[in-house]
Image (cartoon, grey):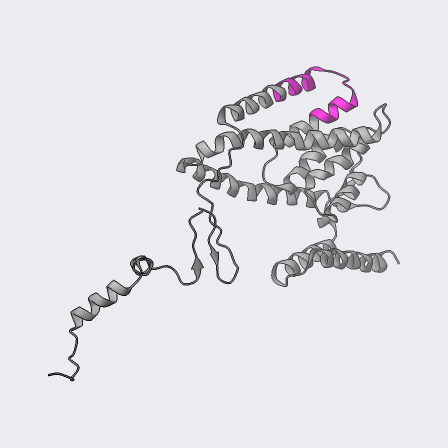
Amino acid sequence: MAGVPQEVPASLRERRAQASQPSGGREAAATPRDSSISHNSTGVDPVSRDGSQDRTIPRGLTMSMISWRQGVVIAAMFGISFIVIMSLRGALEGAPRGFSLFANLYLAGTIIFGGGPVVIPLLREYVVAEGWVSPRDFLLGLAIIQSFPGPNFNFAVYLGALAVQGTSVPTAIGALIGYIAIFAPGLILITGTMGVWHKLRSHRWLISCLRGVNAGAVGLIYTAVYRLWRIGYLRGGDQTAGSLESDPWWVVITATSFVGGMWFKLQAPVAILLGGAMGMVWYGIVKT
């Protein structure tokens, strides 16, 4: 009837709504997006609305700054240099102290695996056992280096400076020899590995092998800590070192530091100061 509004069928209303809707809206409805993430088409990490960033590797990013052929050449050259240096180390009798120091630390830097603590027993084997540094100076330097940030490999600089004392090699040159010899193998190998890693990382058997090697590294760290425990006690002005298990009080200090750091979130500087205070308590009771 005229003047009376007629009801529009639902199908017609739907067609009219679709016709009036922008094309971008239909695409957005067809491809719903996560309301918490703002996506883009550049291939970089998506950024959430709260400013945080998902740790997603961009599609075009690779770790190969050098080609795999260059990587193989670098690794081969390192292998040749290692064989030559070790051969001269074993063949030369009465070699200059500078070369012997470089060869020993070059060997330690090559065979080390398992993290910083593992290198300490190796450095003791290749420096203290040679008679270049006394056990007392070794442990004092270890205590100093543990109080500063940075890798334990820096300990080789201290040992290099002490190892050349009494020779024609200046102390600064000995420290430089120790620095280069301990760091060079790792830097060369990681550079060569970067060239072939993007080719090898797709093999699941290799990834599984590396996981097993990492698990073995944990055992090496515990072994290194135990070996340090056996030679970590200085007897007054004596140049030799003994085991920390010779006095139960050192066991108490060690257990206190471990429990405090593991379960009570005790900071390392506080643990060091606490251990020093407990050591002074022992000195005040035993020596007075």
What residue lies at 56% left-to-right and 44% top-to-bottom? 218
Residue at 65% over, 20% down: 86
Q: Position of residue 206 (x, y in %)?
A: 44, 35
Q: Is residue 210 left or right of residue 83?
A: left
Q: Is residue 15 left or right of residue 124?
A: left
Percent coordinates x, y for residue 160 in the rendering: 77, 32
Q: Residue furthest left?
A: 1
Residue 69 lies, in percent from the top left, at 50, 23
Instruction: Assess whether residue 154 is covered by the magenta stretch.
Output: no
Residue farthest to the right?
Answer: 288
Nearest the camera: 40 or 2?
2
Is 11 situated left or right of 42 in this image?
A: left
- In depth, the one of 282 and 146 nearer the eye is 146
Query: Is 287 above or below relative to 43?
Result: below
The image quarter in which residue 105 lies: top right
- How many numbered tags mark residues here? 0
In the picture, the quarter occupied by the N terminus is: bottom left
Q: Residue at x 84, y 60 (%)?
A: 285
**In this picture, which residue range is highlighted in magenta?**
82-103
144 relative to 220 in the view: left or right:
right
Residue at position x 77%, y 59% from top?
Answer: 278
Near-viewer residue (2 or 202): 2
Residue 286: name its quadrant.
bottom right
Front position in the image: 95 or 52: 52
Classify 69 as above or below 153. above
* Res 129 seen here: no
Looking at the image, which residue sits at the far front?
A: 2
Q: Is residue 239 visible?
A: yes
Magenta stretch: helix, strand or loop mostly:
helix
Q: Quadrant of the C terminus?
A: bottom right
Q: Position of residue 56 (x, y in %)?
A: 46, 49
| 95 within the magenta span | yes
